[in-house]
Image (tube, grey):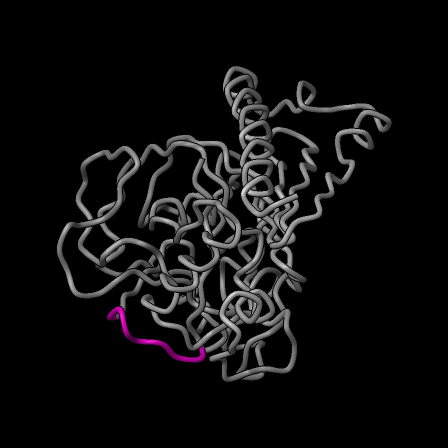
Amino acid sequence: MNKLSSKVLVSVLLVLMAAFVVASCNSSDSNEGENAAGKMSSEEKNEESAVEEMSSDNKNEVIDDAEDVFDSVTFISVGTQRLDMVYVCGGTFTMGCTDEQGGECLAWEKPAHKVTLSSYSIGKHEVTQGLWKEVMSDNPSEYKDDDNLPVENVSWEDCQEFIRKLNEITGQNFRLPTEAEWEYAARGGKRGNGNKFSGSNNIDDVAWCDDNSDRRTHLVGTKQPNELGIYDMSGNVWEWCSDKYGDYTADSQNNPTGPSSGTEYVNRGGSWDDLAGGCRVSRRSGNSTGYGNSSIGFRLVLSK
């Protein structure tokens, strides 16, 4: 199979997967809290989870492992590495300084405001050094013990170049998450339980931070996931977003993409170098496009 045919097949499989899950997301809106419609028998699950293998120059493959309407994960292979993308059903949430954040909110997390998002897929893990090396053939990270460590010491500009090359390889439309997409996923989307951190009110359950990290990064996915099965959205490394950094307003928004002007871009999630307060789901920061250090990495979003 040639490279073009492989890209077309990957795209078709992704479209079919997205169509199935969008239908499931829509049906779940009228049946909140019930997963029966998305459940399958064990035999049906085994059939639906069968691996779709392809032989191609760029070694792409996609597997749909949809256990229920919230747990649809697309696996995309890039050479020897695999990207796990979690489908997030769109919805409306309150972004910013919400009640569970208590007195820890900072001025730039206010005012809280309503945001409505369309559905999207987001990385189950932060981008690893193994994936970065597969795409870029180098490794800028300070901590290089294992390919499953998050890549770090990358700037916003570095991330854009990585994404450009990844999209060339896969034929897909990967990008950085918007700040709103990032926070909605960190809060657990429609499954969110109103936690201070991503997946828990106990930071040790879900995050590598200053109190437990031994002053360095850790392998992705070694803490508990949040309600959507996404790991490390609190702690380990800060994550770049696509938005320019700016003040919030109280206005309700639909699929916001941030301010049109500014010199810094948003970082979210806190890191191994931050105290617990820096790893809260509403905590935000910003840096210039060329800045990077050992506490800053990123994760990907896959557009429909």
Highlighted range, magenta: 288-294
In the image, 3 versus 113, the foreground residue is 3
Indicate yes or no whether the magenta region holds residue 292: yes
Residue 163 picture quarter: bottom left
Q: From what the image shows, is residue 22 above or below residue 1?
A: above
Image spot of residue 246 (x, y percent): 19, 56
- The residue that appears at 66% across and 64% down in the rendered structure is 222
Q: Residue at x 73, y 38 (%)?
A: 52
Q: Which quadrant does the C terminus fall into? A: top left
Which residue sits at x=65%, y=42%? Answer: 62
Residue 295 percent location from the top left of the image: 44, 75
x then y, percent, for residue 122: 50, 47
Q: Is 221 placed left or right of 178 in the picture? A: right
Magenta portion: prevailing SS class: loop
Tell me if 189 is positioned left or right of 258 in this view. right
* For residue 283, above or below residue 2: below
Q: Which part of the image, by quadrant, shows the N terminus?
A: top right
Single out the residue that lies furthest toward the front: 2
271 or 72, which is in the foreground? 72
Where is residue 269, by image quadrant? bottom left
Q: Nearer the viewer, residue 204 or 245?
A: 245
Marks counted in the figure total: 0
Query: Taking 139 as reference, is 182 above or below it?
Result: above
Q: Residue furthest right?
A: 43
The reply to whether the magenta stretch includes residue 304 is no
Residue drawn at (76%, 35%), measured in percent from left and top?
49
Q: Residue furthest left?
A: 261
Percent x, y of residue 74: 61, 42
240 or 271, which lies in front? 240
